[in-house]
Amino acid sequence: MSLEPFHWSRARHRMPIPDFHALMYPLLQLADHGEPLRLRDSYATLADAFALTAQERHQLSPSGQQYLFNNRVTWAASYLRKAGLLESRGRGLVAITPQGYITLREVRHIDMAYLMGFESFREFRRRTSSSTPRPRGPEDSDTFEEVPDCLTPLESMEVSWRAIRADLEFDLIERMQQIHPARFEQLVIDVLMTMGYGCGESAGQNVGQSGDGGIDGIINEDPLGLETIYLQAKRWVNPVGRPDIQKFSGALAGRRARKGVFITTSHFTREAQEYVTGLETRIILIDGPQLARLMIDHNVGVSTVDRFEIKRLDSDYFLEE
């Protein structure tokens, strides 16, 4: 890999394993050559730049499932993507964005305070913090693992777990917005089938390409198809408004359907949400974040990479008879 010389001073001297904040700027530099960068190809280059020893390169994370340094490079890439400085180009591939080029010209270091200057990153942080206790100190804290001193170790672990989950939700939405619409329609069917809707393996049908008047999928809830759920799946970035829901409602009325689910990778306007509350036909709206949470909860499109067990003292074991 032919690259421009790195420009950060701390790589010139022996240092401990850098945290993921210190890796963000050099990783963005690695992507500066224009071609998509395979993250796994960056591990050795970055480790060389920081003069890591063989022992440091192979030090495992606390769970013992991943190399600590490689995991931190992955987190650095994730945060750069959320700020719009990198973009995904496929599994394990990232590419620099126009804003990324601007950043390399404007600054010599990237930290949380800098990333908070981008709306997409602020939105990610809002989603992360909405369900977790807020750390003490300013929003631009550059320590990802920072948690309030008043929390117990178990509570601290939960804060970190929720942050990891929010990161995964973001990645799922981003990936879904890149796949073919027909693949997204099948994904929606897979999620609902995994949740227990439908009777039998062939109960879910993708009909989005058959001109069924706004119906993308059908799930039969019983073997005879007496109870049917009709699906509309929109792989959109822009919000779904009331007119789109009205069209779907009309398609359901044409089939005399009683149940419909409208799923999108974006979100619904207030008018769209208010419209469904007055309908006789039952229409459920599922936006991008909710769909991502359902995928995580029901193991669709995700896999387990680490697992931690929390154990406590079994007092009964020590009772004397």
Image (spheres, rainbow, N blue to C red):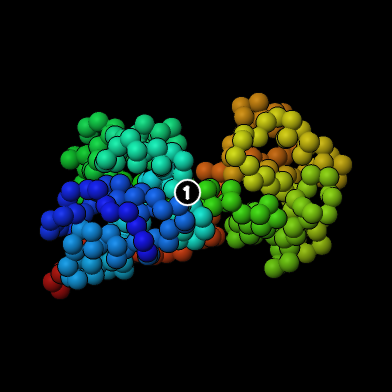
Quarter the N terminus occupies: bottom left
Where residue 273 appears, x then y in whole percent? Answer: 64, 31
Q: Which is more toward the observer, 131 or 52?
A: 52
Residue name at image x 18 percent, y 48 percent = 9
Q: Which residue is most to the bottom? A: 321
Task: Give the crowd class for mark 1: few <14, some 14-19, many >=20 residues within 10 Å.
Answer: many
Residue 245 seen:
yes
Where residue 206 appears, x then y in whole percent? Answer: 74, 58
Question: Is the residue 271 above or below the residue 54 in the image?
Answer: above
Asked if residue 307 lies left or right of residue 147, the reply is right
Q: Amino acid at mark 1?
A: Glu
Quarter the C terminus occupies: bottom left
Quadrant assignment, res 204: bottom right
Where residue 75 appears, x then y in whole percent? Answer: 34, 53
Where residue 87 appears, x then y in whole percent? Answer: 47, 48
Q: Secondary structure at mark 1?
A: strand
Question: Is the residue 148 above or below the residue 4 in the image?
Answer: above
Residue name at image x 20 percent, y 58 percent = 50
Asked if residue 131 lies left or right of residue 280, the reply is left
Asked if residue 58 lies left or right of residue 182, the reply is left
Question: Is the residue 77 above or below the residue 316 in the image?
Answer: above
Q: Which residue is mark 1?
A: 87
